[in-house]
Image (cartoon, rainbow, N blue to C red):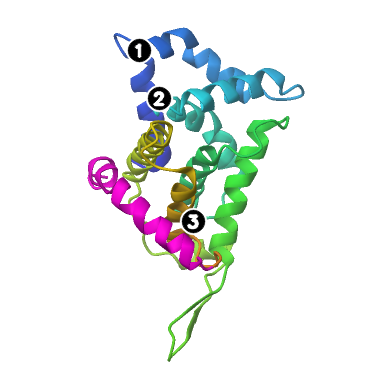
């Protein structure tokens, strides 16, 4: 089962849930909600409103993110096209999860189209960027363009567990937000931890942290370690 199938399975689990939670019951017919999100042409107003509501819910209810991923999955598949590998297509869905967690630019119209494009652009840039590794013996790594990978691929890795990790990240994000709200962690410390400890693991071109940021990140790491061990280590 691939990553898109995993999302579809998780979505059907929500639809067939015997006792839906209060927030889900308020959404009404989930299939109708999915159709509303996907029907964003020529007027995206209803689609945009549904997406914004779900993304706001996902701050405390990670399952709401599953609904959004399922709603946008067909458009994301169409955006990547057929001349890419299954791994590349799975990466776009993972990047869509990160884009949704960023919640950037949600006030602009045509939200479904914008979110899908943003996820695809993120994956494409990562696939075509040239990296350099090493200090004394520098090695350049220049990945092939996505449309060429298909011709070279012998096998595709199984990405079925990626969606589980994405949902765990959503829960971790919610727990961090609650920790900040409770005053146990400052926003500045979280920002330093996010930019210095997290961002650089997926963006090697991120700016180098200052000494002050490193100190804040170290303090935040001690506060966040219990959340990491509880919510991420099992992913």
Mark 1–mark 2 CB contact (< 8 Å): yes
Say if the magenta span includes residue 216: yes
Q: Which mark identifies residue 195?
A: 3
Q: Secondary structure at mark 3?
A: helix
Q: Residues within 10 Å of mark 2 (few under 14, many from 20)?
A: some
Name the quadrant of the C terminus. top left
Q: Is residue 219 visible?
A: yes
Q: Please give the name of the residue rendered at 41% of the width and 26% of the height, measured from the top-left corner.
A: 60
Q: Secondary structure at mark 1?
A: loop
- Report the magenta stretch's main SS: helix
Viewer-nearest of labels 2 and 3? 3
Viewer-side residue, 164 vs 83: 164
Q: Please give the name of the residue rendered at 44% of the width and 86% of the height, measured from the top-left corner.
A: 135
Q: Please give the name of the residue rendered at 46% of the width and 46% of the height, measured from the top-left corner.
A: 94
| Inter-mark Cα distance, 2 to 3 | 25 Å
| Inter-mark Cα distance, 1 to 2 | 10 Å
**Of marks 2 and 3, which one's residue comes earlier in the chain?**
2
Place residue 137 in its image quadrant: bottom left
Report the residue marked by disc 2. Answer: 61
Viewer-side residue, 215 vs 178: 215
Give the magenta-colored segment's residue range: 208-235
| Inter-mark Cα distance, 1 to 3 | 35 Å
Report the residue marked by disc 1. Answer: 21
Q: Please give the name of the residue rendered at 31% of the width and 44% of the height, measured from the top-left corner.
A: 161
Q: Is residue 146 above or below residue 175?
A: below
Q: Secondary structure at mark 2?
A: loop
């Amino acid at each position: 089962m691939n990553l898109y199938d995993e999302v579809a399975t998780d979505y059907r689990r929500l639809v067939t849930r015997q006792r839906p939670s209060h927030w889900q019951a308020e959404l009404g017919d989930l299939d109708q909600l999915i159709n509303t999100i996907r029907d964003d042409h020529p007027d995206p107003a209803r689609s945009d409103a549904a997406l914004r509501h779900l993304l706001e819910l996902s701050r405390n209810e990670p399952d709401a993110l599953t609904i959004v991923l399922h709603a946008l999955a067909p458009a994301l598949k169409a955006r990547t096209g057929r001349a890419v590998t299954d791994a590349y297509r799975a990466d776009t869905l993972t990047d869509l999860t990160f884009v949704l967690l960023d919640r950037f630019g949600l006030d602009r119209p045509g939200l479904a189209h914008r979110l899908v494009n943003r996820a695809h652009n993120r994956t494409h840039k990562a696939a075509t960027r040239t990296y350099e590794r090493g200090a004394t013996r520098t090695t350049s790594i220049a990945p092939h363009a996505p449309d060429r990978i298909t011709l070279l691929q012998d096998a595709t890795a199984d990405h079925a567990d990626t969606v589980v990790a994405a949902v765990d990240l959503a829960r971790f994000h919610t727990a961090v937000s609650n920790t900040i709200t409770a005053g146990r962690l400052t926003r500045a410390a979280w920002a330093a931890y996010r930019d210095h400890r997290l961002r650089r693991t997926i963006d090697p071109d991120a700016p180098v942290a200052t000494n002050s940021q490193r100190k804040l990140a170290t303090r935040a790491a001690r506060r966040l370690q219990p959340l990491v061990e509880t919510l991420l280590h099992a992913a």
